[in-house]
Amino acid sequence: MTSNTGGLDIRVVGGGVIGLTSAIALAEDGHRVRVLSRDAADGTTSAVAGGLCWPYRIQPYERAVEWSVRSFRVLTALAERPAETGARMVTGTMTATTGGGDDGLAAWYDAVPGLRRARAEELPEGCAWGWRARTPLVDMPTHLRYLEQRLAAAGGTLERRGVSSLEEAGEAADVVVNCSGLGARDLVPDPEVHPVQGQLVVVENPGIEEWSVSADAGATDTTYLLPQPFGLVLGGTARENAWSREPDPAVAAAIVARAAQRFPQLARARVLAHKVGLRPARPAVRLTAERLPGGMPCVHNYGHGGAGVTVAWGCADEVLRMVREVQEGRGPVRG
């Protein structure tokens, strides 16, 4: 990022991966940044995420791919220090049981080095097509700690408190950046924001080294295996407008059963944890600038569905661009 003297006072609402990366981009550009988050990072939806860098359940695809390519490059560089950053480069297969793999992500496929069509013998039983690729796989608890430390090193601060309005968040600031995720439903308010519930099971890894994902477009149930340092993450679900954060034992059993169809030894693997997260979905990501009723410039950055970690750095670049426009007097018009 380019150093920017005479920076602005900025409040970022939300301490998940979207909020932290946006805050880092701004702080490293010379702005005075404070993140306001009701929850500690390990209590956010980001902490439950599987952490695979791949566009998933996010619109609009064209913009999402641009953001994803930027994040891919950043995470690839961070993967050179996996113990510190939580990012590693891992080979795996993305598959589906229907369609031909031409799903609007052509620019993503072109950008991932070494990506190729999977051969028939590389596909799990019942899958019609697939892609083989080496992509970043992020241990999210470690990554979130890294982001908090990087923010602090850039002079940014974290404050653990909720806010009742964006105007409140922006008191005594020059700009407020809204990265509140699912909270934007009430905070903006934006009724288009809704949860897509995801449940997963973490088991002891019997030696699986590659990631594997099978997710048909719009499917409620998916099958994925993500080898993380803390265990093998098995998933999952994608249930629209389901608000519960409590794991469902029957759903957990079905998740393990689907994984065991591919690797029978997983049927006997010791379960380490059950987790549920609520993806902050929206018909399209809201990444725009406006002025709040009181005149405060506000940059919105929310609604990333199941692709938060995948698009975070690309979206952070957009936030930085919009804040620079505010600083240069080219920001959003009033109202």
Image (tube, rainbow, N blue to C red):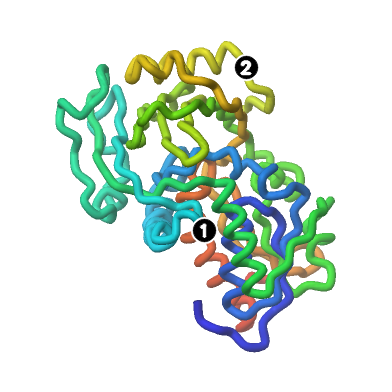
Q: CA distance from mark 2 to mark 1?
A: 33 Å
User: Callout 1 environment at 10 Å: few (<14), some (14 to 19), or many (20+)?
Assistant: few
Q: Residue at x 46, y 31 (%)?
A: 232
Against 180, residue 150 (above or below) is below
Q: Position of residue 87 (x, y in %)?
A: 45, 52
In which quadrant is the C terminus drawn? bottom right
SS at mark 2 in the image: loop
Residue 261 in the figure: left or right of residue 290 = left
Q: Residue furthest bottom?
A: 5
Pointer 1 residue: 84
Q: Are marks 2 and 1 in contact (CB under 8 Å)?
A: no
Nearest the camera: 52 or 166? 52
Name the residue: 60% across, 43% down: 47
Is 259 or 177 nearer to us in this picture?
259
Q: Secondary structure at mark 1?
A: helix
Is residue 122 or residue 237 the one in the foreground?
Answer: 122
Q: Is residue 217 left or right of residue 198?
A: left
Q: Residue at x 60, y 71 (%)?
A: 26
x and y, in percent, of residue 150 in the image: 59, 66
**Residue 257 in the image: x percent, y percent?**
44, 13
Q: Nearer the viewer, residue 329 or 108?
A: 108
**Label 1 amino acid?**
Glu
Numbered disc in front, either 2 or 1: 1
Q: How many marks?
A: 2
* 18 on left or right of 164: left
- Which x, y percent locates residue 319? 57, 66
Dividing the picture into quarters, in which one does residue 151 lie? bottom right
Residue 281 numbered tag: none
